[in-house]
Image: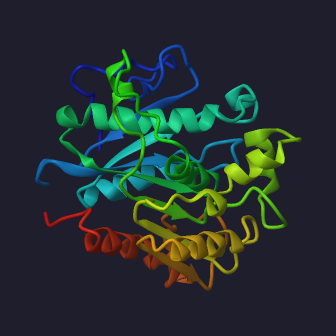
Amino acid sequence: MTPERPCGELPAAVRGDASWFQVTPGDNLSCLRVFLPPDSFRRPVPAAVIFPGGAYAVLALEKEGCAYASFLNRRGIAGIVVRYPLGSIFGHFSRHPAMVDTARRAVQLTRYYAPQLGIDPRRVGVMGSSAGGHLAGLCIVCKDAADPRGKDPVTRCSSRPDFAVLCYPVVTMTGKYAHRRSRDNLLGSDPAPELLKQLSLEQSLPDDAPPVFLWTTREDATVDPENTRLLDAALTRKKIPHRTVIYEKGPHGMGLLSPSQAEKYPETAKWPQEMIEFLRHRKILGDR
């Protein structure tokens, strides 16, 4: 559906596309697009701030961004798709913390504009795929960016998500299971060991992490499925409510799966509905 412009308007992105809005003043790389459910869904609705994947080098905006938002809209969830800085020419070779700063700001903006958008600020989560899954996870493990005394009222809102959906995510920055391309684009070629540990989700998971839905496939040859297992073990150890599904079949980066992929991998094609059921079970998504 056509994105709706928030009341009290977010500034339009410099890119010239009226559907995209600026995340941070003075930052021409970061912007977001708002997708809202039909009016038939009772307000306020939950929202997912969505970070597409692409190894922190490119962004799969349609497959792992706008397509997710449209799917969520049909289930009564707002989708906020984020373009964030990248460690390539497309992001002017940005490095950490530019990515997570943008991600947390996007969560804050969603909460700040929640009343105008018909969103419940207590049900704002994150969703990401591959490197975007890592970025969504960083919103959980990094310190809340809220500044109760901030001059900018947006900064007074919490940046900590209320739930997370991580699809075939990059998790660890250390050891043999690290996705080197994502790590290099995020941190450069010679990051400090302490920073690698800090940005490894399984090593920095807080005790008060929100509920997490997590999935991948055993056949993922791009981001080793051990990433998902590492995070699942950390979630289990800390007794964080979560559901982890490792499907047998399917390559990396499938998103919602095309019709031909769904026919070839019918079990894996169930993940969107299993995610919805998890959100209902956690009382994040209610009845229509």
Q: In this view, does 149 lie to the left or right of 113?
A: right
- Residue 232 in the image: state x and y as whole percent: 57, 74
Residue plotted at (77% across, 58% down) = 179
Residue plotted at (53% across, 13% down) = 26
- Residue 130 in the image: state x and y as whole percent: 62, 57
User: Which residue ends up furthest to the right in the rendered image?
Assistant: 190
Which is nearer the eye, 224 or 159?
159
In what quadrant of the picture does the C terminus appear? bottom left
Q: In this view, does 194 lie above or below 152?
A: below
- Residue 180 in the image: state x and y as whole percent: 82, 54
Residue 139 can be seen, yes or no: yes
In what quadrant of the picture does the N terminus appear? top left
- Residue 228 in the image: state x and y as whole percent: 62, 71
Residue 3 can be seen, yes or no: no
Q: In this view, does 199 lie above or below 242?
A: above
Q: Is residue 227 above or below residue 72?
A: below
Residue plotted at (31% across, 68% down) = 279
Q: Is residue 253 left or right of residue 4?
A: right
Q: Is residue 8 above or below residue 216?
A: above
